[in-house]
Image (cartoon, grey):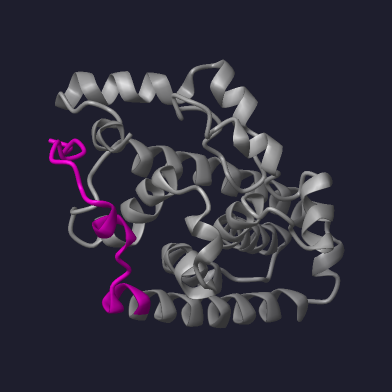
Amino acid sequence: MLAPAMSERPSRDALAEYTTGARMLDTVGIVGFFGATGLAVTRLVNVEGALWEPLTWVLALVGYIGADFFSGTVHWFFDTWLSVRTPILGSMFVRPFREHHVDQTAITRHGFVEVNGSNCLATCPVLVAALLLGTDSAGARASVAFLLALCLGVFATNQFHKWAHLAEPPRAVRWLQDAHLALGAEHHAVHHAAPYDRHYCITTGWLNRLLDRIGFFRRLERAITWLTGAKPREEDAALR
């Protein structure tokens, strides 16, 4: 059975804890991410004409959109289920999301490793798959581009999310937000309006309106509650 968020109210100190072990894992994830990404990009660009193939760009765009969907699904899951005390997942994934609901600006005070390490760890297996793919056909090269764009989008998600909470983002960041290539502050503010259960996608936010309109996450919640009896957002509700 999927465990619901714990009914015992966690302290804000518990939410704020970022352990040495978590930092070490995050650091390993960042090193692995950049190493694997560099190797995959090098393999792709070394194929003459690969960057000019239309299929490569189409699947790269699909991968970037996929990152937005993935960000929303992960955001929804860790906002809604489990607990900050869940082993491993609680410290690395649940804690940042629950802390964010208590203090929206906390993410702006976190360093690069804490903000981006967990997403780097999550993408490393996918990057290994990209490295194992061949580059001897247009389809294979496009598949590598898809996985790279997906992983780069997932990597950027928490950084984009942090920038969306900055009072005065740098000019280049504002340009990305205005171009809707990165999550914008006004768009993301919808998520932080009670009851905090909309606009979960935090890479670009492109999919938020569609997923909200069709009730995608509410349908998932009802299915999980029916299967397990777990109640969504139980721990998060206790904090407010």
Residue at 51% x, 45% y is 70
- Image location (x, y in percent) of residue 120: 48, 68
What secondary structure characterizes most of the magenta part? loop
Residue 89 shows in the view: no
Query: Which of 44 and 79 lies nearest the eye of the viewer?
Result: 79
- Image location (x, y in percent) of residue 184: 71, 44
Residue 237 counted in the magenta span: no
Say above or below: 211 vs 75: above
How many numbered badges does the structure rendering display? Answer: 0
Residue at 77% x, 59% y is 173
Residue 215 shows in the view: yes
Residue at 69% x, 81% y is 42
Residue 10 counted in the magenta span: yes
- Image location (x, y in percent) of residue 142: 69, 58
Magenta stretch?
1-23
Query: Which of 30 and 8 lies nearest the eye of the viewer?
Result: 8
- Judge left or right: residue 172 versus residue 191: right
Say above or below: 238 vs 118: above
Query: Which of 150 and 94 lies nearest the eye of the viewer?
Result: 94
- Judge left or right: residue 74 versus residue 201: left
Residue at 36% x, 25% y is 220
Say above or below: 43 vs 114: below
- Judge left or right: residue 109 versus residue 84: right
Q: Quadrant of residue 87?
A: bottom left
Query: Which of 181 and 191 lies nearest the eye of the viewer?
Result: 191
- Judge left or right: residue 83 versus residue 42: left
Which part of the image, by quadrant, shows the N terminus? top left
Say above or below: 74 vs 24: above
- Image location (x, y in percent) of residue 5: 21, 38
Which part of the image, by quadrant, shows the C terminus? top left
